[in-house]
Amino acid sequence: MVPTESHIPACRPLWSLLEDAFVDEGSEHLTVHGRWGSIEIADTSPLVREALHRMSLGPVALENISALHENFVRWRAGAGPCLIWRKLKNTLDLLGGCVVPSLGLNDGAGPILSLVAVTRDANFWLPFIGHDELVTMRWGTGIERLNGDQALACPGLTYQVILHGAPATEIAKSLLDNAGTITQVAEALHVEKALVADVVAYLAGAGLVVPARC
């Protein structure tokens, strides 16, 4: 599995800042303070300010920002160009581990999983994984308890993944037990293939899901 393109989720990408991060806004400056220090944001546009404000309140769907909605819809449909969304995403990437990418279902409820960085230089992206590619969990990955939730962690990686509930927990445990494809996991758990693909892509983005070696 050598990703050459990005996965576009069928479910809802959600975004937030770490709980101990906060945004300092001024008329001519924008700074995010977090556990690894302070980060000055060069783009102080209203869109970036609005996105960071919403993210400081908890996991949010950024496409609800009116200035971003149409551009984001084009991105989800693979119908670019999506210059506004990509510009905002580049700014979020500069925040590294201060950003918490999450995945929610399309029912508007909270996230089913969240990626929480353990290092400042964490950089999130969603690799595309074919439905019939054989994958498994990286060796050394295990489940531990974290603030009442189950979390996937592996020594040396920049992210741990908080499993907030079904079906993310079941999908993760399935790949911990055995290697499999997205198609196989979907059939075994009776979960929509697109949802399994989303969860697997997020786990791969965290470095936890890797190609299964024969």
Image: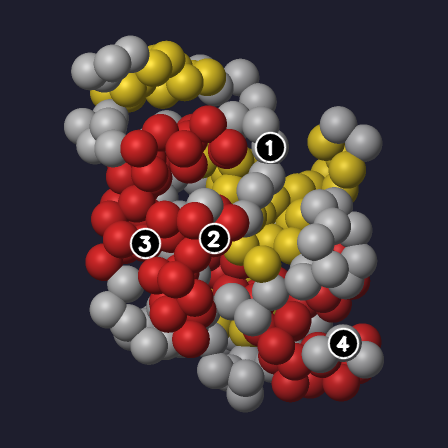
In this figure, what is the number of numbered marks?
A: 4
> Circle 1 — which element?
loop
Name the amino acid type tagged 3: Trp
In the image, taking residue 2 as reference, residue 65 lies left or right, namely right
In the image, taking residue 1 as reference, residue 29 lies left or right, namely left
Which of the numbered marks, if any, corresponds to residue 85?
3
Q: CA distance from mark 4 to mark 2?
A: 25 Å
Q: CA distance from mark 4 to mark 3?
A: 30 Å
Whichever of labels 2 and 1 marks the residue nearer the N terminus, that label is 1
Name the amino acid type tagged 1: Gly
What residue would you read off at disc 4? Answer: 191
> Circle 3 — which element?
helix
Q: Position of residue 82 (x, y in %)?
A: 28, 63
Q: Is residue 110 visible?
A: yes
Q: CA distance from mark 3 to mark 1?
A: 20 Å
Name the amino acid type tagged 4: Val
What residue would you read off at disc 2? Answer: 63
Crowding at mark 4 (Cα within 10 Å: few <14, some 14-19, many 20+): some
Whichever of labels 3 and 2 marks the residue nearer the N terminus, that label is 2
Q: Position of residue 172 (x, y in %)?
A: 69, 60
> Circle 4 — which element?
loop
Colour theme: secondary structure
Name the amino acid type tagged 2: Glu
Q: Is residue 112 visible?
A: no
Q: Kindly check if marks 1 and 4 are in contact, taking CB atoms under 8 A apart as contact.
A: no
